[in-house]
Amino acid sequence: MRFTKGNHAFIVATHTDRAHIHNHIIFNSTNLSCDRKFRDFFFVGIALQHLSDLVCIEHGLSIIKPKRPSEREKRTTYPERKSFRDELRETVDQILQEEKPDDFDAFLAALQKKGYEIKRGKNTAIRGKSQKRFIRFRSLGAGYTEEDLRKIFAGEWEQDPEKMQGQQEPNGRNRRTWQRPDTEFDLLIDIQKKIAEGKGRGFETWATNHNTKQIAKAIYFLEQHGVRDYSEIEAKLKEKTARFGELSSTIKEKEKRLAEISVLKTHIINYSKTKEVYVSYRKSGYNKKFFEAHREEILLHKAAKQAFTELQTDKLPKVKELSAEYAQVLAEKKAAYTEYRQVKKEMQEYGIAKQDIDRFLKIDEEAQQQEKENKKETAR
């Protein structure tokens, strides 16, 4: 009544069927005389709050203490709902774990069996039955992009199930993580060089402790691998470097062969599909109108014939034979890549260990030389 000054009709509805009893007040914007309307103003809510507090004080009632939005209790709780992207990530994980497709195309075929619609293009997208829009793989995050999935099928990435289950995003979503080779130790710090660049005594203390820990880790690594002589370190490093180069060449050869097989399969299929059209084109006397009407098929047929000529073989392989060879070469590449990752890790570790030992011996030699010079000065 005080807020409307008795000029506007209003209704007070009290909610008593809730844990917190409260009122809803509704008033008519047009006054009782029907010749004016309520004039709203800035901070009308604050003015109404002050008036409500004043009425409560007059009647000995409690007043709500103001709280920040972050401190307020939420009275309504909403059931947790998985987003379409969460469901899609779970489906991807399930397919990779259970069906283990050989390549990206087989993976997409498995998704289609589960009722997903695939849209090809520059960025492959997917849509479920209840979705209105397509979702691009690149929007699903690390480990779910088309590029990352292709790396999985090529054997370049290895899935880590323990990390997959444990790691979550800030909003609680599970995310796939991939096992990365972590080096067990790092290179020693050239303390004198850093001090010359302007680092203080605090940095010198930290760097000294860091170098001590790193050289201890390097020695422990060498002991674990049964290396007790400096010449053995050099021999191991040389061996791992040579093996790394061999595996790199092998993987490149396998990738080249896989590309050749894919191209050859495409040409064989195109040749088979366009053979009748090209025969008709030849029978027409290489008619220009016929060519324009079937330009794409004829060009594909010519490209296939050119590829077969460059292949210089009397008999073309069958598509089934090429598919079997592709699967074998891909398996060999995956096996080589597994060893490649391990050898690369060992090569890096031996390289770091050698550099740390070299640096440590140099520091020790410099310290001994400095000690000799100090003794000479003392003797003088």
Image (spheres, grey):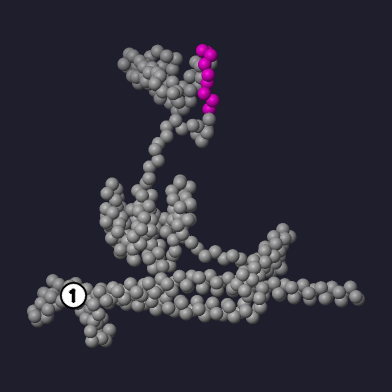
Please report the residue visible at 40 percent of the width from the left and 62 percent of the height from the top.
148
Left or right of 202, for residue 124: left
**Where does the image place residue 66, in percent across and percent down from the top left?**
53, 27
Q: Which residue is mark 1?
A: 272
Residue 364 appears in the rendering: yes
**Where does the image place residue 170, in percent across and percent down from the top left?**
48, 47
**Where does the image place residue 74, in percent across and percent down from the top left?**
46, 32
Please report the residue visible at 52 percent of the width from the left and 23 percent of the height from the top.
64
Please report the residue visible at 36 percent of the width from the left and 49 percent of the height from the top.
87
Q: Is residue 95 magenta?
A: no
Q: Nearer the viewer, residue 163 or 26?
A: 163
Left or right of 226, for residue 74: left
The residue range painted magenta reads: 58-66
Q: Nearer the viewer, residue 68 or 229?
A: 229
Residue 140, compared with residue 363, is above or below; it is: above
Left or right of 50, for residue 305: left
